[in-house]
């Protein structure tokens, strides 16, 4: 990152995030067992065939890539590669591997292994078609010598380096026998700080500190990975999870806002199990109601803005979210440096009425429903909102009432996930509600907002098309200079917010979690994550 | 009887085809094939499918459309490049070798996946079956003898109360009170972490300790049904002529009840015994999830959600077979208890 970019990052961080800088405790005591709830069981932990989030959690401890992001600065930090060079044209990445890194079976990590890890994704016998889209930006990996590997990128896409740097490196010796390796669903041999020592189906995953991990003696990792063992549970039910925590059987658990506010009061909360409400800059998800641009009804911007003005988010936040959420102001996390800072649309039925009238929607026959003459044909303002989760129904029941008062008839339709997705993919709906995850700190809006993504199975399922937005996205994607990319994407997000293709719902303001009082930590949170890798067991 | 049994067994063949064809066609028609699941994983990260919370993360490349080559590769990987009926016949052909194919989720042979989940469900199935019969038969008999008395009324109220509690609520209650507050039982799982280091008696005790709460949840529904069925059946018999005659002959009440009446009263109960086969696949999604048991119920549910066709078909095959044999078994028991019954 150049100086200008760094300055922009520091400035924007100072404006958007509380001023803290957590540093690892280099003298953190070592040892102990850290128990936490994974939330579900990974069907397989195989580095190539696994697709779920639970397996990724396990792999984060067991596997290593060439570089990783710093939890506090978000800069690239060396892992298996001690240094790297990026060519002037930004298309060639050369990584120099450290010489003291070994896999869990004791064999050294070489450039051959890195090349193998990359090629395996494209090896048809590995049946890893699901992984390919993530690495398509890279054309090849070449071994320059035993410890040097070079990746060449297809284009200037700004995330190409990330794809190469975070590639999970696996030992060629073990995984090259594809048939045998594909059966290794409960074994994982990598080069990370922990070894997968036990995987009991339905019960537990246990990790053990890897004695020969290169970082154990390296000052750069002082204060990290302090536990001797890590135990992961698979509890899905929140009540069970909370009871386990109360009994002292869990050292860490994520909390939902309801659990934080309602289910964690009185002893032992605050004594043996401590709950936290922290703010950090990790991008957080946002929910939305998306309007299908293929339908005549939603093509008028006035209508979409009016519909957003009829969404009483202030009240919903108070009623269902204990006031703990921010009202989203667009398609990017509120505190992101990419957020252009436009004003969130407030609940304003009067303004909505004006906008609807401007779009030609009035209740001439006084039957309580707005109507409009289109080509001599009278049509009433009616549409159906489809949703895949019963949990969110209460929000839309409230919305329906406010719409009714404004003369709009909205029908609610719950659909099972796969049936829901079928309609979404076919573009066969009026309005849809879902949530997008926070995504990357450095976002790429193409997946959701580019008109090229408005294809069957694409994420721009509402068919939002704005040539200006397309152009800016295309330019930003190949812009290596972060400050320039931020500037371009700010314009993109400002335009999207202006077009109101979604009625944006909420951004989580806090991360809620609890930990046992046995845990020591350098800070409640780091800037881009909670930072459990820096925790330790306090002396009893 | 033999002819009847042969007829029943032969009838199982078309029934089997009926069940498997319908299931095969239905799951294939439902939206969200394994290919689409994989595409969803690419599009939404892992957060998408399953629970249906919706949404998910954004893939790193930022592109949305997965190219045709990838889709074709996925189709070939799962055998979806062939038409539906061909796939069904392939499934049938493999079945003759007891090969159920590979689970898309676990990437292991279906039979291994089912085998790994099977012991948990079997243990609970058998334990709850035996316990239910052991308690319900004497309870029902006593309720019938004391019909109308306070014992009968109080137990009826209690049984109705327990029957109306959903297993989910009961499970949470048991966990919060008996495992949490009173700390009498473990919260879930099937054994302690230090199980391996325990003595034989210690192991047994540890298992029993883990068994109590989920077993109560498993039993609660069938318990009431069977007790009430036993009571009413016994009551009918007690009022019948032959019992009155036995009493008139001066036989002791114990002999009247347990020798003459009970055998006849057991006939309706025996119908349920065919369900014994069901004990092999006894699995409840809710109970297994709550008590962190890795059983068939959860597997079935997750397989349907993730459209793991091969596992769904494997489970359908095994459970329909057990169900059909269970019915035949019920009929045999009928004849054994009451020789007057003869299926012709």
Image (cartoon, rainbow, N blue to C red):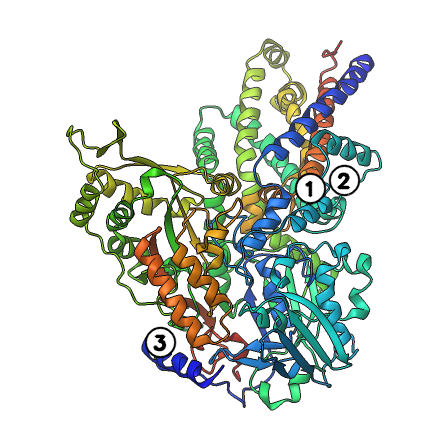
Residue at the spot 59% in from the left edge and 67% down from the top edge = A155
Residue holding disc 3: A17
**Quadrant (top left/top right/bottom left/bottom right) for the C terminus of chain B:** top right
Residue holding disc 1: B311
Residue A395 in view in this figure: yes
Q: Nearer the viewer, residue B214 or A426?
A: A426
Q: Residue furthest right?
A: B97
Asked which secondary structure carries label 2, the reply is loop
Q: Are marks 3 and 1 in contact (CB under 8 Å)?
A: no
Corner quadrant of residue A406:
top left
Could you confirm whether marks 2 and 1 are on the same chain?
yes
Asked which secondary structure carries label 1, the reply is helix
Badge 3: chain ID? A
Q: Are marks 2 and 1 in contact (CB under 8 Å)?
A: yes
Q: Nearer the viewer, residue B278 or A333?
A: A333
Q: Is residue A339 above or below residue A459?
A: below
Badge 1: chain ID? B
Q: Is residue A363 above or below residue A100?
A: above
Marks 3 and 1 sit apart, C-alpha to C-alpha, by 48 Å
**Quadrant (top left/top right/bottom left/bottom right) for the N terminus of chain B:** top right
Q: Nearer the viewer, residue A408 or A152?
A: A152
Residue holding disc 2: B100
Q: Position of residue A443 (x, y in %)?
A: 46, 66
Could you confirm whether marks 3 and 1 are on the same chain?
no
Could you confirm whether marks 3 and 2 are on the same chain?
no
Marks 2 and 1 sit apart, C-alpha to C-alpha, by 8 Å
Q: Residues within 10 Å of mark 1 (few under 14, many from 20)?
A: many
């Amino acid at each position: 990152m150049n100086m200008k970019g760094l300055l922009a990052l520091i400035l924007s961080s100072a404006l958007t995030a509380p001023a803290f800088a957590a540093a690892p405790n280099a003298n953190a005591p070592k040892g102990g067992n850290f128990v936490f709830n994974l939330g579900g069981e990974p069907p397989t932990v195989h580095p190539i065939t696994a697709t779920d989030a639970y397996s990724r959690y396990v792999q984060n401890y067991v596997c290593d890539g060439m570089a990783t992001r710093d939890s506090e600065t978000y800069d690239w930090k060396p892992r298996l590669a001690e240094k790297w060079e990026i060519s002037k044209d930004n298309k060639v990445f050369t990584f120099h591997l450290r010489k003291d890194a070994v896999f869990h079976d004791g064999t050294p990590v070489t450039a051959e292994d890195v090349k193998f890890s990359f090629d395996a994704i494209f090896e048809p016998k590995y049946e890893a078609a699901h992984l390919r889209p993530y690495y398509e930006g890279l054309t090849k990996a070449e071994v320059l010598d035993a410890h040097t590997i070079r990746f060449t990128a297809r284009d200037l896409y700004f995330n190409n380096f990330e794809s190469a740097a975070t590639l999970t490196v696996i030992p060629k010796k073990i995984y090259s026998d594809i048939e045998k390796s594909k059966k290794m669903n409960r074994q994982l041999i990598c080069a990370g700080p922990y070894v997968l020592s036990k995987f009991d189906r339905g019960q537990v995953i246990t990790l053990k500190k890897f004695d020969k991990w290169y970082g154990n003696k390296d000052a750069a990792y002082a204060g990290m990975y302090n536990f001797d063992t890590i135990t992961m549970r698979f509890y899905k039910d929140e009540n069970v999870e909370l009871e386990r925590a109360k009994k002292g059987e869990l050292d860490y658990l994520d909390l939902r806002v309801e659990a934080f506010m309602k289910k964690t009061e009185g002893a032992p909360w605050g004594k043996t199990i401590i709950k936290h409400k922290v703010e950090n800059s990790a991008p957080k998800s946002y929910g939305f109601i998306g309007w299908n641009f293929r339908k005549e009804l939603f093509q008028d911007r006035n209508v979409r803005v009016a519909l957003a003005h009829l969404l009483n988010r202030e009240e919903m936040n108070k009623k269902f979210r204990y006031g703990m959420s921010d009202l989203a102001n667009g398609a990017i996390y509120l505190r992101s440096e990419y957020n252009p800072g436009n004003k969130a649309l407030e609940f304003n039925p009067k303004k909505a009425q004006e906008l609807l009238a401007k779009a030609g929607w009035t209740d001439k026959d006084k039957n309580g429903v707005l109507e409009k003459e289109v080509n001599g044909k009278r049509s009433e303002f009616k549409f159906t909102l489809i949703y895949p989760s019963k949990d969110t129904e209460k929000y839309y029941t409230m919305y329906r009432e406010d719409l009714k008062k404004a003369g709009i008839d909205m029908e609610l339709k719950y659909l099972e996930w796969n049936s829901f997705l079928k309609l979404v993919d076919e573009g066969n709906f009026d309005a849809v509600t879902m949530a997008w995850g926070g995504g990357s700190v450095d976002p790429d809006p193409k997946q959701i907002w580019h008109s090229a993504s408005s294809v069957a199975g694409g994420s721009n399922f509402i068919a939002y098309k704005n040539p200006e937005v397309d152009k800016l996205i295309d330019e930003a994607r190949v812009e290596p200079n972060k400050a320039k990319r931020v500037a371009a994407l700010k314009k993109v997000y400002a335009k999207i917010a202006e077009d109101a293709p979604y009625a944006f719902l909420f951004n989580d303001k806090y991360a809620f979690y609890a930990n046992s009082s046995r845990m020591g930590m350098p800070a409640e949170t780091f800037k881009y994550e909670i930072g459990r890798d820096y925790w330790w067991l306090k002396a009893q | 009887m033999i002819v009847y049994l042969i007829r029943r067994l032969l009838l199982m063949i078309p029934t089997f085809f009926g069940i498997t064809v319908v299931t095969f066609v239905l799951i294939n028609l439902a939206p969200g094939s394994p290919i689409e699941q994989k595409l969803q994983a690419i599009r939404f990260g892992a957060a998408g499918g399953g629970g249906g919370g919706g949404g998910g993360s954004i893939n790193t490349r930022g592109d949305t459309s997965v190219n045709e080559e990838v889709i074709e590769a996925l189709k070939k990987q799962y055998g979806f490049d062939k038409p539906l009926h061909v796939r069904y016949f392939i499934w049938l052909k493999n079945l003759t070798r007891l090969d159920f194919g590979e689970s898309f989720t676990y990437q292991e042979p279906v039979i291994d996946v089912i085998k790994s989940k099977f012991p948990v469900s079997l243990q609970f199935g058998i334990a709850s079956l035996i316990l239910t019969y052991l308690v319900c038969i004497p309870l029902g008999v006593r309720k019938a003898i004391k019909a109308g008395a306070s014992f009968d009324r109080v137990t009826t109220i209690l049984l109705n109360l327990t029957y109306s509690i959903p297993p989910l609520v009961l499970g949470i209650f048991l966990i919060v009170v008996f495992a949490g507050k009173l700390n009498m039982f473990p919260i879930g799982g099937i054994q302690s972490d230090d199980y391996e280091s325990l003595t034989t008696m210690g192991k047994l005790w540890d298992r029993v300790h883990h068994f109590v709460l989920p077993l109560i949840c498993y039993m609660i529904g069938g318990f009431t049904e069977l007790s009430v069925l036993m009571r009413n059946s016994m009551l009918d018999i007690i009022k019948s002529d032959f019992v009155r005659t036995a009493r008139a002959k001066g036989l002791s009440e114990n002999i009247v009840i347990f020798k003459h009446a009970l055998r006849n009263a057991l006939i309706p109960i025996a119908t349920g015994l065919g369900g014994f086969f069901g004990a092999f696949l006894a699995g409840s999604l809710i109970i297994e999830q709550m008590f962190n048991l890795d059983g068939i119920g959860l597997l079935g549910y997750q397989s349907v959600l993730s459209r793991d066709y091969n596992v769904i078909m494997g489970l359908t095959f095994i459970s329909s077979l057990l169900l059909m044999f269970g019915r035949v078994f019920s009929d045999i028991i009928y004849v054994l208890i009451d020789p007057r019954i003869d299926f012709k």
